[in-house]
Image (cartoon, rainbow, N blue to C red):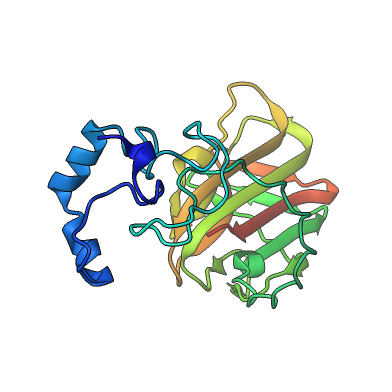
Amino acid sequence: MDCNRMPNQYDSYIVPKNFSRKQEYSFLDNAMMKYLQEKGCLCPCCGGYRPHPSGDPCKPYPSCPHNPLYPEQCCCPGTAGPAEDVGPTGPAGDMGPAGPVVTDNSMFAANATGATIAVILAGTLIPLPSVQSLDAFAVNGANTVFTVPTTGRYYLSYNINLTAGAVLQSQILLNGAAIPASVVNPIVSVSGYSAQVIVNLTAGDTISLQLSGLLGAVVLQNGAGASLAAIRLQ
């Protein structure tokens, strides 16, 4: 079989003359495709009908004059065209809704008066009446117990500064019990006590600042004598 000597070299398949176009398409079944391939009438790399218009297969060619399987398509792919310029940036989208601000729940209270605290062995709560910024936290009349307004994960911190060193224990109480990580219990006399901790708190819980471990009186420094802060993180 000589593909180059067929009546139309681009229609390199055999069909009866009285077949309609629809019949031609169905006539070119798998067996015929295999036969044409074996005879070298199909391009081995792209499957297009051979010979190609310019002779050599699989190079950039124009559209095939007649290709019943792929009408008006090239027998082989051409080279990629040049990239176009990047289009302009589209307009900015609408701003999304504001997310929750968890740090809306926070508090700070201090004792800046240079107060004298009568400490007992079982523990004495330090009043914090100064510079109160309580947000939604509630405080009792003695300014010693603060009630948590919202359940969450909180960062707690405190500082106690005395006018003279003493061997004491300091801690934050949660519902009347010491938070272990907040306990400072030095073995020598010191005048400064501080700690930070992150804990889960439930609405209605109470927190307090306490000194214990001594039967006697200590004097807080003026200004930053004692303070307690709470900030909800989550």
Up-down relation of residue 186 to residue 118 (above or below): above
Q: Position of residue 170 (x, y in %)?
A: 58, 41
Choose top left, top right, bottom left or bottom right for residue 219: top right
Residue 143 appears in the rendering:
no
Q: Could you say which quadrant of the image residue 164 lies in?
A: top right
Q: Residue furthest right?
A: 222
Counting from the top left corner in percent of width and height, residue 187 is at 58, 22
Residue 211 in sight from this viewpoint: yes
Q: What residue occupies the far top of the structure in this picture?
A: 188
Q: Is residue 53 left or right of residue 134?
A: left
**Could you tell me residue 89's position as x and y percent?**
78, 64
Q: Residue at x 27, y 49 (%)?
A: 13
User: In terms of depth relative to the viewer, which is nearer, 129 or 25?
Assistant: 25
Residue 223, x across and y down, in percent: 86, 52
Residue drawn where x is 45% and y is 47% of the image: 75
- 156 relative to 151, above or below: above
Q: Residue furthest left?
A: 31
Which quarter of the image is occupied by the N terminus? Answer: top left
Query: Would you place residue 218 above or below residue 69 in this image?
Result: above
Q: Quadrant of residue 31?
A: top left
For residue 56, side relative to residue 139 (left or right): left
Q: Is residue 128 left or right of residue 38?
A: right
Q: Nearer the viewer, residue 210 or 34?
A: 34
